Amino acid sequence: MVEATKIKEHMPVVCTNNEQFGTVDHVDAGGTIKLTKDQRGQHHWIPMSWVTSVDDKVHVDRPGDQAMREWMSTPPEGAQY
């Protein structure tokens, strides 16, 4: 499990093919990462369980198109909006 403390605001979030599909807004206490607003002004959340590693980017365990199909578009319980 990756330490959430390594994840910082504005870090790129990249998929398994190393393409960016989001940017970190912040890590929620409930075990999710809130992403900055997309082009439509919508926030999205991804679970920490997707994160495989953190260096200068947050790497997740799935392709970007799958991640964008599976991310949450409403705040999970306990998340900050």
Image: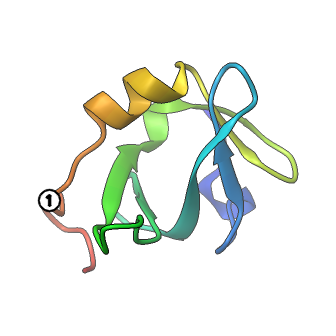
* Residue appearing at x 63%, y 48% in the figure: 13
**47 lies above or below 78:** above
Q: Position of residue 59 (x, y in %)?
A: 69, 35
* Residue appearing at x 71%, y 20% in the figure: 17
* Residue appearing at x 66%, y 20% in the figure: 16
Residue type at the position of mark 1: Thr
Rate crowding at label 1 as few (under 14), some (14 to 19) or many (20 or more) other CA atoms within 10 Å. few
How many dots with numbers? 1
**53 lies above or below 40:** above
**Quarter of the figure with the C terminus:** bottom left
**26 lies above or below 3:** below
* Residue appearing at x 52%, y 29% in the figure: 64
Q: Position of residue 23 (x, y in %)?
A: 59, 61
Q: Identify the residue under disc 1.
A: 74
Q: Position of residue 8 (x, y in %)?
A: 69, 69
Is 54 placed left or right of 41 in the picture? right
Q: How are the residues colored?
A: rainbow
**1 lies above or below 44:** above
Work out whether residue 30 can be spotted.
no
Is 21 placed left or right of 80 in the picture? right
| Label 1 secondary element | loop
**Quarter of the figure with the N terminus:** top right
Work out whether residue 38 can be spotted.
yes
